[in-house]
Image (spheres, helix red, strand yellow):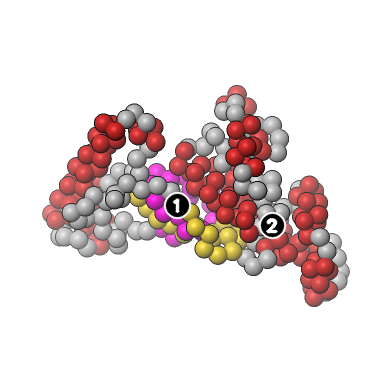
Amino acid sequence: MPQVRPKVVLLDYTPDPEQVIALAAKLCYSDADIDTLKKGVESKDVSKFLQRLMSMGHHSPIEHASFTFGIEGVSRALLAQITRHRIASFSVKSQRYVSAGGAETFNYVIPPAIEALGEEYADKFRAQMDEIQKWYNEWQTLLGGACEKSNEDARFVLPNASETKMIVTMNARELIHFFRLRCCNRAQWEIREVAWQMLALVSEVAPMLFAGAGPACVTGPCSEGKMSCGRPEEVRARRKELK
């Protein structure tokens, strides 16, 4: 089925991320050797220490924990947005080495706003994707067939709706920043859905670290000013569902 929806999988992460962060933070304030500090962290309440660390605004130790996600069922339009977060590593399915040609239409994302217009309009969108597939196949053939050399120019007719897949790695500090911006109702719907899935996944493996993560309205006033969605209770309720 060509039509797809965002799906996120947590592939890997720093083992015991909260203890690693606590150890890194304690090192800043102690002259003890690392083995002694490690034993001290393991024997104490990491939760209270992390809360104190965050309240102090001492965020650099958080960078020692990283998380790697597999993301699929998303559009090239989303790719343009997520790569603006530059403190991250990205590996993305190539439109040059991976052909979108063939009898079946390439995978694509239909915006919910178009689906909301009714099946007639969703079918119209699908027909447009089918037509673009014909253009792509035609250019592929004219340029030499399904190969790297042909793909790199035939892809110019593909739309932002085209599906892509990627692996993304971010450290915890950048993730918290990412969630603050992209879980907000003001964020574009697709990257917002991806962000909420990512937040749900990391909240399971590092609940103390990401306890206050999310848009600004989760823990305080909205940061969007006059551009606010005006629905902070709705956002807070969604955040509570992750606990």
The magenta region covers: 69-92
Q: Which residue is mark 1?
A: 7
Q: Which mark is residue 23?
A: none
Is 37 placed left or right of 103 in the picture? right
| Residue 239 to residue 29: above or below | above
| Residue 135 to residue 114: above or below | below
Give the structural element (helix, strand or loop) at label 1. Answer: strand
Whether residue 38 is visible here, answered yes or no, is yes
- Of residue 96 and residue 128, the one placed in the foreground of this image is 128
- Of residue 50 and residue 159, the one placed in the foreground of this image is 50
Residue name at image x 15 percent, y 60 percent: 144
Q: Amino acid at mark 1?
A: Lys
162 within the magenta span: no
Q: Which residue is mark 2?
A: 62
- Where residue 204 appears, as percent x and y from the top left, is 62, 56
- Where residue 234 appears, as percent x and y from the top left, is 60, 33
Residue name at image x 64 percent, y 31 percent: 233
Is 56 placed left or right of 134 in the picture? right
Give the structural element (helix, strand or loop) at label 2. Answer: helix
Check the image and name the residue furthest to the left.
Answer: 142
| Residue 202 to residue 3: above or below | below
- Of residue 132 and residue 194, the one placed in the foreground of this image is 194
Whether residue 174 is visible here, answered yes or no, is no
Q: Residues within 10 Å of mark 1 (few under 14, many from 20)?
A: some
- Of residue 197 and residue 97, the one placed in the foreground of this image is 197
- Where residue 206 appears, as percent x and y from the top left, is 66, 57
